[in-house]
Image (cartoon, helix red, strand yellow):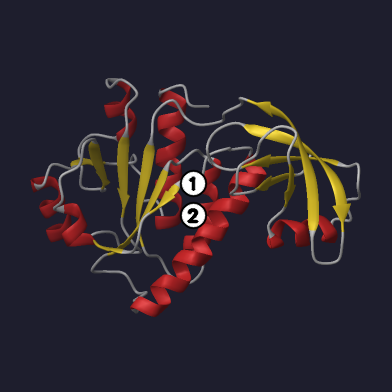
Amino acid sequence: MPRFFCPQPLVAGATVSLPEAVAHHIQVVRLAPGDVITLFNGEGGEVQASLVAVAKRSVTAEIQAHVAREAELPYAVTLAQALPEASKMDWIIEKAIELGAAGIVPLAAQRCVVRLSSERAEKKLAHWQGIIVSASEQCGRNRLAQLAPLQDFNSWSSQQDLHKRIILTPRAEQSLADWARHQPPQAITVMVGPEGGFTEAEEKAAIAAGAIGLAMGPRILRTETAGLTALATLAALWSGM
């Protein structure tokens, strides 16, 4: 059944006009009045809705039953990802959402090749928000991950947080998997460097601010692989799969 994000009240029995992007998608896939779709507004659960009218520029649907279904991890994982080259960030965000990430924090680190002006950063954030929505629609999540503004790594890593921060580094003696085996499921932030990794100075500053340095094993993973592997590892060990 097609699923769409609809950021408005979804009350059983009500007839709603669907957002323009959703209406366009419905027209592209040639759904017709009477077809049933799934809608979610990010506040929890989902609803089934029956299409009432499909016009060239608008679509209306009647809200039916609410289903209190969730697909969230039993713990919140935030992926703090230093900006990689080209379109890798798009792929990382899409797959992180599929793996259950509750938050995405884009980081500007010293070895980042990509440098974004304020205007470009705003456009990228809007683009990444769209990826979060489409990935959530596809994978069955009913809550949207939080996307933070682009952060300077040194400023962000020095801030205190309410939950543990992990910085992935090949210089660490303990692996994430070994650490997680001895920890209860909990809210956590995983920090991933760009191509070339974080500098030694960045790692030391983050660890001095309370981060835990952990490795991903004996092999050096690419930036687009490391964070996703970490998410999958935690899910396997903490019953998130």
- Above or below, 180 against 201 in this view is above
Q: Which of the labelled discs sits on residue 162, or is there none?
A: none
Task: Tell me if mark 1 has few (under 14), some (14-19) or many (20+) residues whose alpha carbon lies within 10 angstroms of its own.
Answer: many
- What residue do we see at 12% from left, 60% from top? 201
Q: Residue furthest left?
A: 208
* Front position in the image: 220 or 126: 126
Task: Tell me if mark 2 has few (under 14), some (14-19) or many (20+) residues whose alpha carbon lies within 10 angstroms of its own.
Answer: many
Picture quarter with the N terminus: top right
Residue position for label 1: 96
- What residue do we see at 40% from left, 65% from top? 84
Q: Marks 1 and 2, how far apart in space?
A: 6 Å
* Front position in the image: 170 or 203: 203
- What residue do we see at 77% from left, 62% from top? 24
Q: At label 2, which amino acid type do we have?
A: Ile
Residue 45 placement: quadrant: top right
- What residue do we see at 72% from left, 53% from top? 18
* Front position in the image: 49 or 177: 49
- Above or below, 100 against 109 in this view is above
Q: Residue furthest front?
A: 14
Are the residues at dot 1 and dot 2 in contact (C-beta closer than 8 Å)? yes
Q: Is residue 230 visible?
A: yes
Q: Position of residue 206 (x, y in %)?
A: 15, 50
Relative horizontal placement of residue 115, taking residue 171 as reference (left or right)? right
Q: Is residue 199 visible?
A: no
Q: Position of residue 98 (x, y in %)?
A: 56, 42
Residue position for label 2: 92
Q: At label 1, which amino acid type do we have?
A: Ala
Q: Position of residue 130 (x, y in %)?
A: 56, 59
